[in-house]
Image (cartoon, rainbow, N blue to C red):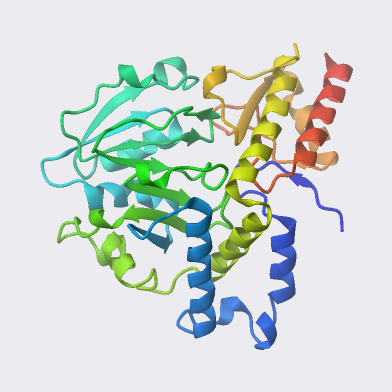
């Protein structure tokens, strides 16, 4: 069977080796006569799978025992509410940086639960820049500072981790987690939807420093309280067991690839190739300032948008799938997460060069 190259922003490509192992174990997991998705989450077999997945993630990211690792449901969008519900006390203010559509959604949701200060925004540049930190207007004593290191829709990425002193730093790492090393100790809380670099949709990771647990108010539902999930090993209710299992397979795969440091080198190489081609062309362009370009999501436009439909149709026919840009911005977008091989980027560049030659 021939597999296409998938540039979808999410749900995104999964490693072929992971899919093949899941296929082999689909009907009969290790001779047990049933599938993982039919198994009780309380069964020792699944508990072992869950515990190994957590340990592998801790190994990959260097997560210390000072942090709880939670495997939750609801996507990153539920975290837009859970973060303030758990970290923003009565009368307190949280600072948010607005660099794109996901930041805007997080800000809008958080405002339901307390005082929100938008300390900086790049909306006036149509989210093509990251505001330099020396321009941020942070609150005197914020409960936390929230930012989205990578905005998938606009292809905008921070080139730095914000310096916020002793203030709790919160990051939506849905599209960058596990793509490069990160010093977890600089953050109070990291959350990430799974469907980009972790596994299939349906799972959300939360990495939260343990001293931040137990701050939720009495009116916060148990299912939306981080303490509940930390106390119950993410099994207060039935978790998304199959997604958890698949995430574990991805973590194993990442270890076999040499870990996140090696993935970072590959990802940088992929991005440099694609941006280099775009910048060297008079036919394609990328609007984001160079220092703030995303390694994971590369948007680009054609010189003549009347060619968008033929470009996408021919790309699909060539096995280069899901290149259409987000509906809010148009154009094209190539998402080149961990599971997208370098050969896929090479094939995309070759196709783009040929299309330009025939249509410029």
The percent position of residue 194, horizontal first and vertical second, equals 52, 54
Please indicate, yes or no, whether residue 36 appears anywhere in the rendered image: yes
- Tell me what residue is drawn at x 30 percent, y 21 percent: 136
Q: Name, please, the residue furthest toward the left.
A: 91
Q: Name, please, the residue furthest toward the top.
A: 282
The percent position of residue 290, horizontal first and vertical second, equals 57, 18
- Image quadrant assignment for residue 101: top left
- Image quadrant assignment for residue 134: top left
Taking the image as shown, residue 339 lies to the left or right of residue 158, namely right
- Tell me what residue is drawn at x 50 percent, y 20 percent: 128
Q: Is residue 122 above or below residue 151?
A: above
- Tell me what residue is drawn at x 55 percent, y 29 percent: 155
The percent position of residue 144, horizontal first and vertical second, equals 25, 40
> Quick one: quadrant of the C terminus?
top right
- Image quadrant assignment for residue 207: bottom left
> Quick one: quadrant of the N terminus?
bottom right
Taking the image as shown, residue 129 lies to the left or right of residue 286, namely left
Please indicate, yes or no, whether residue 335 appears anywhere in the rendered image: no
- Tell me what residue is drawn at x 28 percent, y 25 percent: 119
Which sits in the foreground, 71 or 112? 71
The percent position of residue 261, horizontal first and vertical second, equals 59, 44
Q: Is residue 288 above or below residue 240?
A: above
């Amino acid at each position: 069977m021939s597999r296409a190259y998938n540039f979808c922003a999410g749900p995104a490509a999964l490693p072929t080796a992971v899919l093949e192992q899941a296929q082999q174990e689909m009907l009969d997991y290790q001779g047990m006569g049933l599938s993982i998705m039919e198994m009780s989450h309380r069964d020792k077999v699944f508990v072992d799978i869950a515990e190994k997945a957590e340990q592998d993630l801790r190994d990959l990211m260097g997560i210390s025992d000072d942090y709880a690792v939670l495997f939750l449901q609801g996507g990153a969008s539920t975290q837009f509410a859970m973060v303030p519900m758990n970290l923003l006390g009565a009368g307190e203010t949280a600072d948010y940086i607005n660099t794109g559509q996901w930041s805007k959604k997080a800000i809008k949701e958080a405002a339901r639960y307390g005082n929100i200060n938008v300390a900086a925004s790049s909306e006036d540049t149509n989210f093509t820049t990251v505001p330099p930190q020396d321009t941020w207007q942070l609150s005197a004593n914020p409960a936390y500072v929230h930012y989205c290191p990578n905005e998938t829709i606009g292809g905008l990425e921070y080139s730095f981790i914000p310096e916020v002193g002793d203030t709790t730093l919160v990051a939506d790492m849905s599209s960058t987690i596990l793509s490069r090393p990160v010093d977890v100790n600089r953050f109070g809380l990291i959350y990430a939807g799974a469907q980009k670099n972790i596994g299939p949709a349906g799972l959300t990771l939360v990495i939260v420093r343990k001293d931040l647990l137990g701050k939720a108010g009495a009116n916060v539902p148990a299912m939306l309280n981080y303490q509940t999930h930390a106390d119950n090993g993410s099994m207060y209710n039935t978790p998304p067991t199959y997604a958890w299992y698949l995430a574990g397979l991805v973590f194993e795969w990442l270890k076999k690839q040499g870990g996140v440091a090696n993935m970072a080198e590959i990802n940088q190489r992929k991005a440099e190739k694609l941006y280099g081609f775009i910048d060297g062309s008079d036919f394609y362009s990328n609007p984001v300032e160079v220092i703030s370009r995303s390694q994971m999501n590369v948007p680009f436009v054609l010189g003549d948008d009347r060619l968008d439909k033929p470009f996408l149709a021919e790309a699909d026919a060539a096995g280069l799938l899901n290149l259409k840009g987000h509906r809010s911005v148009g154009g094209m977008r190539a998402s080149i997460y961990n599971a997208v091989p370098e050969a896929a980027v090479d094939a995309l560049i070759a196709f783009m060069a040929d299309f330009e030659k025939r249509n410029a």
